[in-house]
Each structure stands twice: as C-alpha cells, then as structure tokens.
Image (cartoon, rainbow, N blue to C red):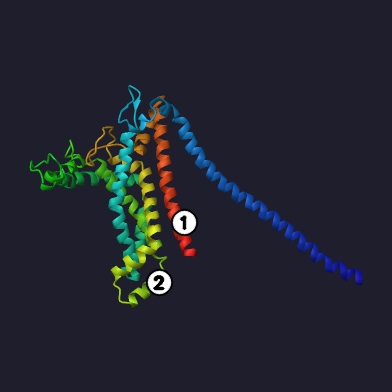
Amino acid sequence: MHATASNAATAPAHTGASRTSTDSRNDLIFGWVLKACALLVLLSLIGAAGSTLWLGQDAFRTFGWGFLTSAAWDPSNDQYGALVPIMGTVGTAMIALVVAVPISFGIALFLTEIAPQWLRGPVASAIELLAGIPSIIYGMWGLFIFAPFVAEHIKPWLMNNFSAEPPDGQVSWLVQHVPWIAKFFSSEYPFFGAGVLTAGLVLAVMIIPFISSVMREVFQTVPTRLKESAYALGSSTWEVVWDIVVPYTRTAVIGGVFLGLGRALGETMAVAFVLGNTFKFSWSFLETGSSIASTIANQFGEAQGLQRSALMALAFLLFVVTFIVLLIARLMLRRLATKEGN
C-alpha cells in the first residue's frame, strides 16, 4: 500500500518535469524560427542593396561622381547621367507632398474632431478603398482624363500668370518683379498635358489615403481628457487642434508624411504614364521629364552592357533614398511610442 502511494505521488512529478522540459525546448525552437524570419528580412534588404550596387558598379566606375550630376542619357553613345531622373523623382514627390499633406491633414482632423459619428465610418472606409486601387488605374486616369484637363485649364493659367512668355502676351506683375519664378513655369509645349506637375498631382491623389489614414490613427491617440479639459476652459475647436492635438502628435504626423513620401518616390506605372519620359533637363514643373522608377521600367527590358549597369545604379540610388526616408519615418514613430509609454 505504501509503495503504491509513493509511485502515484512521484508519477505526476515526472510528468510535470517532462512537460516543462518539452515546453522549454519548444519555446527555444520557436524563438530561433522567429529570429530566422527577422534575419531573413535583413538579409533580403542587404542583398537587394548589394546586388544593385554590384550590378551598377560599371556605371559608377565609368562616370564617377559625374553620373550624379550629368543630364546626358544617350544609349547610342553610351553616355548616361542620373540628374534628370533624380530631379524628376524629387520634383514629382515634392509636388505630391505640397498638395497631399494639407488635404490629408484636413481629412484626418475632420474625421477625428468634427465629423458626426455616423459619417466617420463611411468616409474612413472610402479613403482606405482608395489606397487599394492599382497604380496603373491612376496612371490611365491621369493620361486620358487628368492630363487633358491640365493642358486645357491648369497649364495655360499658370503660364499666363507665372511665365516670362505667356500665351496671351502680357507678362504678369509678379514675373516683372520676381523674374526668377518664371523658370519654374515655362513650357515649349503649352497644350501638352503630361509633365512633372501632372505626375506630381497624380501622385498626390495616390498618397492622400496613406497619409490621411496615418494621421487619423495618430490623432485618435490623443487622450480624451486633454481635449475635454481644453474645451472645459473655453477653448474653441481650432485652439484645441493647434494647442493640444498637433503638439501631442507632431512627431508621428511627420512620420506619416515621410511614409507617403516613400510611396511617392518609388511609384512607377502611374508616373510613367503622365511624366512624358524625356531626358531634357529643365527647372520648369510644366515640362516633361523622367523619374528613376519610370526610366528603369521603360528601358530595362532592352538594355545591355553599360546601359543596364546605369539602370541598376539608378535602382541603387532609389533604394538608398527610399530607405533613408522610411528610416526617418520609423524613428519619428518610435519617438511617439516612447512618449506614450512614459
């Protein structure tokens, strides 16, 4: 009887120890699997950067730093420069930000501070649906609908008011007193809608859903008690927004803007449809141009030798710029998370 009771008492102990050992081993395996997944992402990132740099080394070796400052792109003579694609990429992205950030800010504030509860859900869902539209749809819309509208209405108005050689022949007062502004609004083809401005506006439409969604989520993190206290002291909605909401979420808002900038920098198909894809350097937003992504998409299929190396060098430059932009965005978002934790 005593031996039987002793065996019954020790059996659960051995079972518990075995289960603990099994759980520890499973946790160790699970941890290594997760670490391998994380390392796989890092290896993929390093591999993508390294491969584009390796394949583009011939262009960097042949042209040196001049590759970044040259506007030449002549496949017949093997002369390549990244200045025009870089300027097109930066120009379209900046135009997109200038247009998209204020609109996104207004949308986010409307949904979080002003809109009635029954309207917030449908509007937020519509904005999220816009983010899921394929970029080629935006490109076709920009080419067949928006570009003709720009050529017929927006471009003539800009040239009449800001160009040194306006179509109506009368130089505006602003251009007479600030002549340097005219170089940004000149055009050899006043009735052609494609160009840097058109591509930037199409990009703005594309990134508004991303930026506004980030801003809306960030504005919702503001403690309700802070806003209610401000309202209780007699503050208006405007004062609550600028004195409570914006200071509390400033870092994350900037992070969301950088995320939208990263999307604008890497966009390919929509920009390729409406940018014009020419390699003529110009400071004007109304002229056609080329971006890094559209140049790669248009020429990589038939490129050989030094031309292919130049395209891979462009890919490496785009990778570096986009990585830096997204890294800054992540650091800003992390600062907000740290602030909330405190």
Can residue 134 be seen here?
A: no
Q: Nearer the viewer, mark 2 or mark 1?
A: 1
Estimate the x, y position of residue 129 in percent, counting from the top left. Answer: 37, 56
Distance between the alpha carbons at the discs numbered 2 and 1: 22 Å
Q: Is residue 180 left or right of residue 75?
A: left
Where is mark 2, residue-wise? 224
Amino acid type of the residue that numbered disc 2 sits on in the rendered structure = Thr
Can residue 81 be seen here?
A: yes
Image point 38% across, 30% down: which residue? Answer: 65
Q: Tell me if residue 59 comes above or below residue 213 in the rendering.
A: above
Report the label total. Answer: 2
145 or 194: nearer the eye?
A: 194
Disc 1 secondary structure class: helix
* Extreme residue in the front direction: 177
Image point 41% across, 44% down: which residue? Answer: 322
Q: Residues within 10 Å of mark 2 (few under 14, many from 20)?
A: few
Disc 2 secondary structure class: helix
Image point 34% across, 70% down: which residue? Answer: 118
Amino acid type of the residue that numbered disc 1 sits on in the rendered structure = Arg
Q: Tell me if residue 337 comes above or below residue 139 in the rendering.
A: below
Estimate the x, y position of residue 262 in percent, counting from the top left. Answer: 39, 47
State the image quarter where residue 5 is shown. Answer: bottom right
Estimate the x, y position of residue 259 in percent, counting from the top left. Answer: 39, 51
State the image quarter where residue 88 is shown. Answer: top left
52 or 2: nearer the eye?
A: 52
Estimate the x, y position of residue 253 in percent, counting from the top left. Answer: 37, 58
Q: Is residue 317 left or right of residue 180?
A: right
Q: Residues within 10 Å of mark 1 (few under 14, many from 20)?
A: some
Where is mark 1, residue-wise? 334
Image point 37% across, 36% down: which residue? Answer: 297
